[in-house]
Image (cartoon, rainbow, N blue to C red):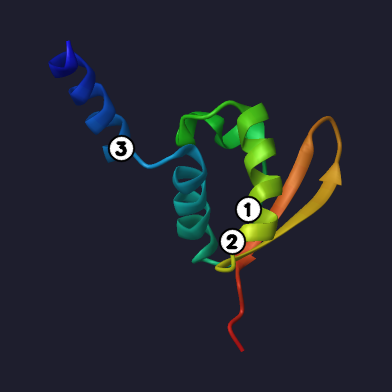
Amino acid sequence: MSATTKPSVESASDEPCKEDRLKSYLLEKAQDGEMYFKSKFIADEVGLSPKEIGALMVKLRDSASELTVEKWSYTSATTWRIEAAQNA
């Protein structure tokens, strides 16, 4: 039975975690300058639900030093503003 368990563990470790996947996506988009978005509009592109994205954005706001993450406004859903962090 351990033979069937190992492949699933290995394949899970090969894929980036949800937070890393979202962070990579946002870093790529922020290279062109600031970006405004609602979670529901990028959900399909990153393979996460809008609710997951919202929860991860709160985490990334505190942990992603490469990004400036700002909760911009709320009109039917939170709008987030991101840009590459300025390393002065």
Secondary-structure class at tag 3: helix
Residue depicted at x 62% and y 59%: 63
Q: Residue furthest top?
A: 1
Within 10 angstroms of label 1, few (less than 14), some, or many (20 or more) residues? many
- Which amino acid type is shown beneath numbered disc 2? Ala
Mark 1 or mark 3, earlier in chain: 3
Q: From the viewer's perspective, is the residue at label 2 or at label 3 nearer?
A: 3
Task: List x then y, in percent, for residue 43.
Answer: 55, 31
Within 10 angstroms of label 2, few (less than 14), some, or many (20 or more) residues? some
Within 10 angstroms of label 3, few (less than 14), some, or many (20 or more) residues? few
- Which amino acid type is shown beneath numbered disc 3? Ser
Spatial separation of the CA atoms under disc 2 and disc 3: 21 Å
Q: Could one spot residue 34 in this view of the protein?
A: no
Residue 13's disc is 3
- Which amino acid type is shown beneath numbered disc 1? Leu
Answer with left or right where residue 45 lies relative to residue 76. Answer: left
Spatial separation of the CA atoms under disc 1 and disc 2: 5 Å
Which residue in the protein does label 1 denote? 60
Residue 64's disc is 2
Q: Residue furthest bottom?
A: 88
Could you tell me if the residues under marks 1 and 2 are in contact, i.e. CB atoms within 8 Å? yes
Task: List x then y, in percent, for residue 1.
Answer: 17, 10
Secondary-structure class at tag 1: helix
Question: In terms of depth relative to the viewer, which is nearer, 44 or 58?
Answer: 58
- Work out which quarter of the rendered image holds the C terminus and state it: bottom right
Residue depicted at x 76% and y 44%: 79
Secondary-structure class at tag 2: loop
